[in-house]
Image: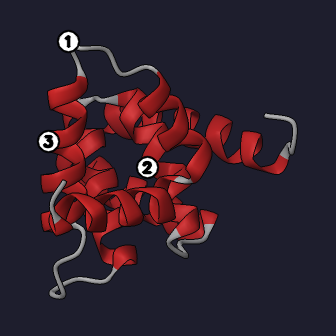
């Protein structure tokens, strides 16, 4: 594997957590391996490692994109990542409010529900 892959795996683990990455790795199949390596190398190793934005700002951008596209499982995952990257629940709410203007009120309404459930699960150590 390349340095980009190794950098990507390091950042992926730092942002998403070892448990999440270990689950993804454990579920790799011959059918999904190339895709998992692609996102590790390019999303995490080439984009998330760029110096132009800090991780908090990258999290804001990703949360907004996930709301706009309605990718709710990814949104929940990135709410957890945003907390890891230092965003407070209040700042996550502000991102959702901002996105509501540009992505639509129904999307923001659903985002609040998903975010609340995700944030609540972070407060419960067993989940």
Which residue is the extreme one toward the bottom? Answer: 51
- Front in this rendered view, residue 19 or 85: 19
**Between discs 2 and 3, the one toward the N terminus:** 3
* Secondary structure beneath label 1: loop
Give the labeled residue for mark 2: 78
Camera-side mark, 2 or 3: 3
User: Dot 1 surroundings within 10 Å: few (below 14), some, or many (20 or more)?
Assistant: few
> Residue 2, image x and y in percent?
15, 61
> Residue 127, image x and y in percent?
78, 34
Which residue is the extreme one toward the front? Answer: 1
Give the labeled residue for mark 3: 38
> Residue 103, image x and y in percent?
21, 43
- Residue 39 vs residue 125: left or right? left
Give the labeled residue for mark 1: 31
Position of residue 101 relative to residue 39, above or below, is below
Q: Which mark is residue 127?
A: none
The residues bearing labels 2 and 3 have C-alpha atoms spaced at a distance of: 19 Å
The residues bearing labels 1 and 2 have C-alpha atoms spaced at a distance of: 25 Å
Position of residue 59 relative to residue 32, above or below, is below
Camera-side mark, 1 or 2: 1
- Residue 34 vs residue 121: left or right? left
Q: Is residue 35 in sight in this rendering?
A: yes
- Front in this rendered view, residue 87 or 18: 18
* Secondary structure beneath label 2: helix
**Between discs 1 and 3, the one toward the N terminus:** 1
At horizontal 39% and vertical 29% (from top left) the residue drawn is 72
């Amino acid at each position: 594997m390349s340095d980009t892959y190794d950098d990507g795996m390091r950042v992926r683990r730092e942002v998403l957590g070892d448990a999440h990455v270990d689950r993804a790795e454990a579920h790799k199949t011959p059918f999904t391996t190339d895709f998992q390596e692609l996102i590790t190398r390019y999303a995490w190793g080439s984009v998330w490692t760029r110096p132009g934005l800090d991780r908090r700002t990258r999290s804001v951008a990703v949360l907004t994109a996930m709301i706009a596209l309605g990718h709710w499982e990814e949104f929940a995952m990135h709410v957890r990542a945003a907390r890891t990257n230092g965003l407070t629940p209040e700042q996550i709410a502000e991102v959702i409010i901002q996105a509501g203007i540009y992505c639509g009120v129904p999307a923001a309404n659903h985002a609040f529900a998903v975010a609340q459930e995700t944030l609540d699960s972070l407060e419960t150590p067993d989940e």
